Image (cartoon, rainbow, N blue to C red):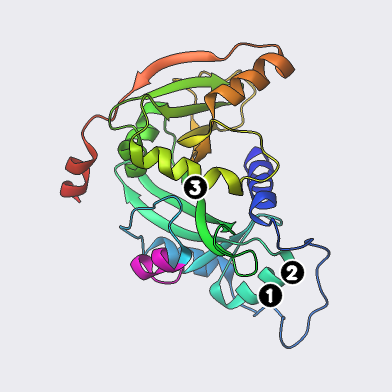
Amino acid sequence: MRLLFVLLFAGSLLAQNEGPRGGQPARSKRTSAAPLDDDRVTAWAMHKPTRAHFVLWETRQQLRRRTGAPLQYYVPAVDKMISPARLDYYQTAYKTVYDVFYRDTPLGLVRVLVAYVKDDARSHLNPELRVGHVFFIFDKDVQLREALNTIYEAQVLCAEGCMMNGFAASVIAEPRQLTEGEMLLARRMRPQWHDMEMPDAAPGVQVFYRDSLYPVDFEHSFVERVDLTLVSNASQEHYSIEVRGKEPTMLNVWRPRRHPSETATAK
């Protein structure tokens, strides 16, 4: 349930300037959903994992040149995986649709959802679609540092170490020192995060945990997913103290077990 809520929230950001979602339109020859078995498409897509790495703020065209068209899509409004044949119908009905890829890792298969943000920096009439969020969803039980070590993009981001703070049921990891490229990326991305006050936001990851009856143990509870996007420890800390009345939990700095260049070489 938490996954659906967060993805819906992200979807509301991604749908900025697309107009209201509205209700589901009446079916017609042009928009009717094809009678395909989406479960069968999922099984097929899972057997064709990608080796591509994902980069924040690259355009959809740039990503597609490296990965090809996705074999599957995800509709956050109805929490549904769909086949490419159904894309036009669901995009018309619900506006926000994520690309879906799969990746083989030492900890098993990881589902990758790519969500786009409209970048109107160059043109308000014809904004570019750019990668704003990448969600890495685990199929098996995995703990915090194992999860981060499994995601190449997290290794790159935290090659020189990431500060980590725990908030309720999530952990935010930010580079201890931003590179010049990361600072430039943050300046380019922040203006497109409409209605969110994160003046200090920078590229980072936010780790979410599986639902449990017990309080989250940040180091040992099982991770549901890792989100690569803009994050802000400072803004989240302010919210936690002012609204929840609770200080964040400071965790030990995380560094990947090996440098990302070694991981890339090993593939």
Kind of residue indicated by mark 3: Arg
Could you tell me which residue is drawn at 32 percent across and 43 percent down?
Answer: 152
What amino acid is labelled 2 in the image? Ala
Magenta stretch: helix, strand or loop mostly: helix
- First-in-chain label (3 vs 1): 1
Q: Which mark is residue 93?
A: 2
* Amino acid type, label 1: Tyr
Q: Secondary structure at mark 1?
A: helix
Image quarter of residue 160: top left
Quarter-wise, where is residue 149 in the image?
top left
Q: Is residue 29 magenta?
A: no
Image position of 156 (left or right of 204): left
Please state which of the two labelled residues, at mark 3 or mark 1, is closer to the viewer. Answer: 3
- Depicted 3 relative to depicted 18: above or below: above
Q: Which residue is mark 1?
A: 89
Q: Residue at x 71, y 55 (%)?
A: 77
**Residues under numbered marks 3 and 1 in contact, where contact means CB atoms less than 8 Å apart:** no
Near-viewer residue (116 or 192): 192
Residue at 45% of width from left, 22% of height from top? 164
Task: Give how far apart the Cα atoms at labels 2 and 3 are.
Answer: 30 Å
- First in sequence, mark 2 or 3: give its number: 2
Task: Tell me the quarter of the picture where residue 209 sits.
Answer: top right
> Which region is colored magenta?
61-70
Circle 3 sits in a helix, a strand or a loop, which is it? helix
Element type where label 2 sits in the image: helix
Q: Residue 196 or 102: which is nearer the viewer?
A: 196
Circle 3 residue: 188
The numbered mark at residue 53 is: none
Q: Nearer the viewer, mark 2 or mark 3?
A: 3
